Amino acid sequence: QVQLVESGGGLVQAGGSLRLSCVASGSIFSFNAMGWYRQTLGQQRELVAVITSGGSTNYADSVKGRFTISRANAKNAVYLQMNSLKPEDTAVYYCAAKYTILTAPNYYTAADFPFWGQGAQVTVFS
């Protein structure tokens, strides 16, 4: 059974940094795409960043230049370095993974990902 486990969330002052990690277990294959989505109460889950096994990435406009996604293919792990955090970045951040890639990363949607972590709370205060 595939499991994605996130870590690294927390409380940080605006302008600060956090690093999220997500490690997958139970998969004998490497995921072709992994990524991060976030969700606030009453809102739909939205893209933060995704990355393919080949290193292609896509970022939400709101995080470009501040967040960096990376991965360790051999570990089936994905990371999100978040700098210059803003109060509007406050959300539950979810790790996502999938095996199949049919389109470029900028066309991925949350519905494309069958595997999800339990979520990590990130709270940014001003």
Image (cartoon, rainbow, N blue to C red):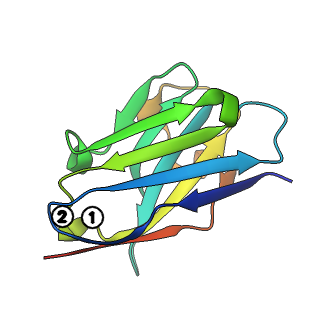
Residue that appears at 14% across and 60% down: 15
Residue 18 in picture, x, y percent from top left: 34, 57
Height in image: 88 above or below 59? below
Numbered label attached to residue 52: none
The residue pinned by badge 2 equals 86
- Specify few, some or many for label 2: CA neighbours under 10 Å numbering under 14, 14-19, or 20 or more: many
Asked if residue 100 shows in the view, the reply is no
- Specify few, some or many for label 1: CA neighbours under 10 Å numbering under 14, 14-19, or 20 or more: many
Please identify the quarter of the rendering in which residue 85 is found: bottom left
Height in image: 20 above or below 43? above
Residue 67 in picture, x, y percent from top left: 29, 45
Q: Nearer the viewer, residue 17 or 91?
A: 17
Task: Identify the element where label 1 is drawn.
Answer: helix
| In the image: residue 124, left or right of residue 30 | left
Residue type at the position of mark 2: Lys
The residue pinned by badge 1 equals 89
